[in-house]
Amino acid sequence: MLLLGIETSCDDTATAVVRDGVRVLANVSTNQDEFHAKYGGIVPEIASRRHAALLSAAVDDALTRAGLTLAGVDGIAVTAGPGLIGSLVVGVATAKALAFATGLPLYAVNHLHGHLFAPFLERDEPPVYPFLALLVSGGHSQLVEVRSPTSLRIIGKTRDDAAGEAYDKTARLLDLPFPGGPALEALARDGDPKAIAFPRHRPDPGTLDMSFSGLKTSVRYYLESEAGRNARRADVAASFQAAVVDVLIDRTTRALDANRAPTARTESDDRVCGTYRALVLSGGVAANGALQSAFLALGASRGIPTFLPERRFCTDNAAMIAAAADRRGEAARVDAATLVADPNLPFA
Ligand code: KG4
Ligand code: ZN
């Protein structure tokens, strides 16, 4: 199946053409960073106006790069939520118009499902179900048990900031340019991750939840202290990054180990579904080299096949939306007459 993908949930105007949820014939993304940078964060009104200005041309661009016209694709996949309402509406309205005009089937995709299927792109041997995914982006941080493309369950999540949000806010404290995640990672490369012992959130017993807002606050207090004023910024960045990675790896390790416990092995046990057959990292923060290394090391230590998306499929893109629609098939099929963008679209 050849799908046109459209993703406009936040600030990337993205379109793609994907064959069978795997082969990427075109992947176009227009980044709006220059319009938001001076505000230090994404301004929703600017984001939706940019999407409205760019999306039609971005659809044409993806089709042209794939050597196709709309008549050559089998369906249209669009992000229906969660995200910024104005941004989502531009993508959803465009996809509905194209579906009405052509009669092509329309598929609605949850943005987070898109991230979970990004590691399937351009891979001959994809992750085997059930797999455990750590999904870390600017808006979400969660551990997801994926039993099949249509059976997904969140088993742990952040109680406050998402990991990417913590990167962005801490980058601002360090006067780094927007977007903060990649800039902080670059600065951390010259720093000592053991220089400052920032706190690591410990979960309540029996949960796999995480928290990053205390860490961000502790970086702020440190920078305001005498020691902090004299500290190397690279050391602060590296020590912050080490704390984030430790928490994410700790929670993923606990999820893997809980899954191996004898009491959790039966199918009837609703808490866990049996031993995971793959480990998957996804979302914008999955582009982080320190997290990637620690995640691969965890997978190797547990002997579980471990998957990272290609870097271009970590941050928001439309290829992952087409991939998720392809995997979910009929479960994602919607009526163009009734589809509405939902900024709070439930996960499953
Ligand atoms: O998935 P994504 O593109 O958008 C959301 O769905 O939120 O993720 C964007 C987030 C931002 O917070 C950004 O700072 C973070 O991913 N990010 C990174 C890196 N690249 C992007 N964080 C840490 N290190 C990176 N290299
Ligand atoms: Zn995203």
Image (cartoon, rainbow, N blue to C red):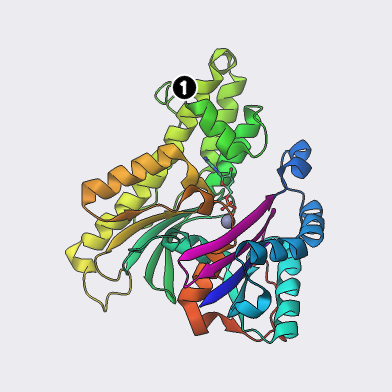
Q: Which residues are magenta?
A: 8-30
Q: Amino acid at mark 1?
A: Gly
Magenta stretch, main secondary structure, is strand
Sort mark 1 into few (<14), some (14-19) or many (20+) by Cα contacts within 10 Å: some
Residue at 61 percent across and 33 percent down: it is 171
Q: Position of residue 253 (x, y in %)?
A: 30, 50
Mark 1 lies on residue:
191
Q: Would you place residue 338 above or below residue 142 in this image?
A: below
Residue at 20 percent across and 61 percent down: it is 261
Q: Is 159 or 335 nearer to us in this picture?
A: 335
Q: Quadrant of residue 123?
A: bottom left
Q: Would you place residue 194 above or below residue 65 in this image?
A: above
Q: Would you place residue 213 above or below residue 198 in this image?
A: below
Q: Residue furthest front?
A: 67
Q: Quadrant of residue 263?
A: bottom left
Residue at 53 percent across and 68 percent down: it is 18
Q: Position of residue 286 (x, y in %)?
A: 47, 48
Q: Does 104 lie within the magenta span?
A: no
Q: Position of residue 219 (x, y in %)?
A: 55, 29
Q: Does 13 lie within the magenta span?
A: yes
Q: Is residue 109 visible?
A: yes
Residue at 75 percent across and 83 percent down: it is 101
Q: Is residue 326 left or right of residue 337?
A: left
